[in-house]
C-alpha cells in the first residue's frame, strides 16, 4: 500500500473532525491516521475494500485451476 502524504491525519484531528477525514476518504480512497507521529490506522473506502477482496478471490480461483490442470490424473484416480 502506498501512503500519500496528503492522506495523513493526526489522531487528534481525526477525533475532533471525523467528517473532514470522511470527506478525505471520499476524495482519495484512504486516510492514514497517525498516533505519536507514526502511521497507526487506515480508514478505507468500503468499495475499495470489496474490490480488493474480490481480486484476492480471483487469484485463488486461478491458482486452484492451475493445480487441478497440472494434477488432473491424480484427482481422477482419487475420485474413483
Image (tube, rainbow, N blue to C red):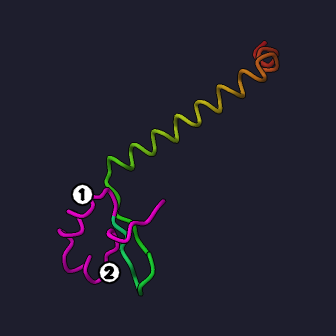
The relative height of residue 49 versus residue 40 in the rendered view (above or below) is: above
Q: Is residue 66 left or right of residue 71?
A: left
Residue 50, placed above or below residue 31: above
Quarter of the figure with residue 5? bottom left
**Which disc, if any, is residue 10?**
2
SS at mark 1?
helix
Cβ atoms at labels 2 and 1 below 8 Å apart: no
Left or right of 14? Residue 44 is right
**Label whose residue precedes the other's in the sequence (2 or 1):** 2
Q: Pick whichever, 5 or 31, lies toward us.
A: 5
Other residues around mark 1 within 10 Å, as few (<14) / some (14–19) / many (≥20): few
Dot 2 alpha-carbon crowd within 10 angstroms: few under 14, some 14 to 19, many 20 or more: some
Residue 59 coordinates in the image, percent (x, y)? 57, 37
Residue at x-position 35% and y-position 58%: 44
Find the residue positioned furthest to the bottom.
36
Q: Residue 45's x, y, as percent?
A: 31, 54
Vertical arrangement, residue 55 with respect to residue 45, above or below? above
Residue occupying image coordinates x 58% and y 31%: 61
Residue at point 17% right, 68% down?
19
Which residues are drawn in magenta? 1-30
Classify mark 2: helix, strand or loop.
strand
Q: Main secondary structure of the magenta part?
A: helix
- Of labels 2 and 1, the one closer to you: 1
Q: Is residue 12 magenta?
A: yes
For the residues labelled 2 and 1, the Cα–Cα distance comes to 18 Å
Q: Tally the numbered discs.
A: 2
Question: In the rendered view of the protein, which quadrant contains the C terminus?
Answer: top right
Report whether 66 appears left or right of 4: right
Q: Most extreme residue toward the front, as rendered?
A: 5
The residue beneath circle 1 is 27
Amino acid at each position: 500500500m502506498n501512503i500519500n502524504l496528503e492522506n495523513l491525519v493526526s489522531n487528534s484531528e481525526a477525533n475532533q473532525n471525523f467528517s473532514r477525514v470522511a470527506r478525505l476518504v471520499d476524495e482519495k480512497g484512504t486516510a492514514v491516521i497517525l498516533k505519536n507521529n507514526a502511521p497507526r490506522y487506515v480508514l478505507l473506502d468500503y468499495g475499495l475494500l470489496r474490490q480488493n477482496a474480490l481480486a484476492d478471490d480471483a487469484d485463488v480461483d486461478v491458482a486452484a485451476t492451475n493445480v487441478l490442470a497440472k494434477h488432473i490424473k491424480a484427482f481422477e484416480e482419487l475420485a474413483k
